[in-house]
Amino acid sequence: MTTLREWFDHFTEATGEVPQHIVFGFVWDDDADRWPAIVVDEVLAFADVPAKALDARFDDSYGGTEAPNFAAWSENFVLFCDQYDGAESICWVPRHPMAHTPLRPGGG
């Protein structure tokens, strides 16, 4: 079990950056009760995301998708939710061209 806050804290620990903006997308119908604080399809300042949304616990292990889809931006990165065989995680890629090791979302 984890929370979005834990995912974003992991990003901050790894990069030293904090997300500045976020947009949430699709929320699975089975999980809609978990995410009532999510505003879908609107760009929000990250500071305006309700704590209830950041602290909702969900299972990110194999089996099913529970986290809401999102795209978030920090000064130098774009963040998004990844899923491989039901296991979910947070990923990020450079916002601007830079040398890095590209990843393959979904397992690679």
Image (cartoon, helix red, strand yellow):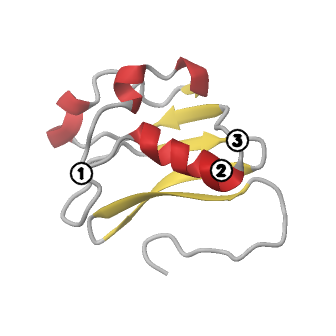
Q: Which element is circle 2 on?
A: strand
- Count the marks: 3
Q: Residues within 10 Å of mark 2 (few under 14, many from 20)?
A: some
* In the image, residue 100 above or below residue 1: below
Q: What residue type is labelled 2?
A: Val
Residue sitting nearer the eye, 87 or 44:
87
Question: Residue drawn at (26%, 48%), measured in percent from left and top?
Answer: 66
Q: What residue is disc 1 on?
A: 59
Three-letter residue code for mark 1: Asp
Q: Point out the tag, 3 or 1, that comes first from the N-terminus.
A: 1
Task: Work out how far the residue at label 2 is from the one at label 3, CA to CA, in angstroms.
Answer: 7 Å
* Secondary structure category for the residue under label 3: loop
Relative to 15, say whether 102 is above or below.
Answer: below
Which residue is nearer to you in this view: 34 or 10? 10
Q: Is residue 54 above or below residue 6?
A: above
Q: What element does badge 1 sit on?
A: loop
Residue at the farthest left position: 30
Left or right side of 22 for 77: right
Which residue ends up furthest to the front in the rendered image? 13
Measured as percent of width and height from the top left, residue 92 is found at 61, 57
Q: Quadrant of residue 19?
A: top right
Q: Mark 2 points at which residue?
A: 78
Which residue is located at x 53 percent, y 50 percent?
10
- Disc 1 crowd, CA 10 A, few/some/many (<14, 14-19, 20+): some
Residue 25: percent from left, percent from top: 42, 39
Residue 84, percent from left and from top = 35, 70
- What residue is drawn where x is 71% and y is 47%? 16
Tell me, for residue 74, which label it has, or none.
3
